[in-house]
Image (cartoon, grey):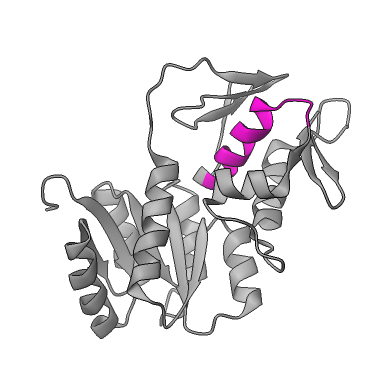
Amino acid sequence: MAELNSHPILMIDDDQELCELLGDWLAVEGFSLTVRHDGESGLEALRAEPFEAVILDVMMPGMNGLDVLRALRQEFQTPLLMLSARGEPVDRILGLELGADDYLAKPCDPRELVARLRALLRRSQNTSTGHQPLQAGDIRLDPDSLLAWQGEQPLPLTQTEALILRCLLNNHGQLVDRQSLSREALGKPLGPYDRSLDMHMSNLRRKLGNHPDGRSRIQSIRGRGYLYS
């Protein structure tokens, strides 16, 4: 059971020594870490109790991290950070395509992991400001809860996708530069070779589909940014 005022985090990783090390570090930083060492039990833990974020390793025996991510995103939109000992670009791209919110290569500095987790939690907080829903055509987004609908059908957006959509709808019809989108949705400036924003944008476009008349909802202005039309 998480202590009062701690942030419950689930870590799914078969490296027991790493889990113990990070558990001690995270406890000092105000997090309460629950650990599962395989994908199946990790999914069971998510179904049994709520967590504010998930740390998921890519390389695990049996059900690997990417398989877990596929299954997880069918049921949960919990903010998720992936870890990979290989750190290969293809792993990072595939993880982001499948719905990971952030990605960190092993071995990682525990201080950077804490910073990434704090950024995920800040972006996921429901501020309950009473803002009116944002709407453009048949797309509607609650800017506080980050729940989205197309008509009457819920849209299964990840936290990052919803934050991108919120920024675009707040600036409906206006260009939003890539750096502004990255800072608001990813919580960090966009590096020169960082494709994470592009991957999240691609996922968002796929889930939204086109306008009923076939036009793209999100236009890309090469080298500048995006606008919701």
Above or below, 201 against 21 in this view is above
The main secondary structure of the magenta stretch is helix
Q: Nearer the viewer, residue 13 or 222?
A: 222
Magenta-colored stretch includes residue 168? yes
Q: Position of residue 211 (x, y in %)?
A: 81, 28
Q: Residue 189: horizontal and vertical position, in percent? A: 60, 56
Q: Which residues are magenta?
A: 160-174
Judging depth in this view, the residue of 61 and 32 nearest the camera is 32
| Residue located at (61% from left, 80% from top) | 88
In the picture, residue 123 is in which quadrant? Answer: top left
Does residue 157 lie above or below 89 as drawn? above
Q: Is residue 87 above or below residue 131?
A: below
Q: Quadrant of residue 92?
A: bottom right
Q: Closer to the camera, 83 or 36?
A: 83
Position of residue 228 measured from the top left corner of the image (x, y, whole percent)? 76, 32
Q: How many marks?
A: 0
Q: Is residue 178 above or below residue 82?
A: above
For the C terminus, the quadrant is top right
- Point 52% across, 68% down: residue: 66
Q: Does residue 138 show up magenta in the picture?
A: no
Q: Is 50 on the left-hand or right-hand side of 103?
A: left
Q: Residue at x 50, y 30 (%)?
A: 147
- Place of residue 120 in the rendered image (x, y in percent of width and height, measured from the top left): 42, 51
Q: Residue at x 87, y 50 (%)?
A: 222
Residue 160 relative to residue 128: left or right = right
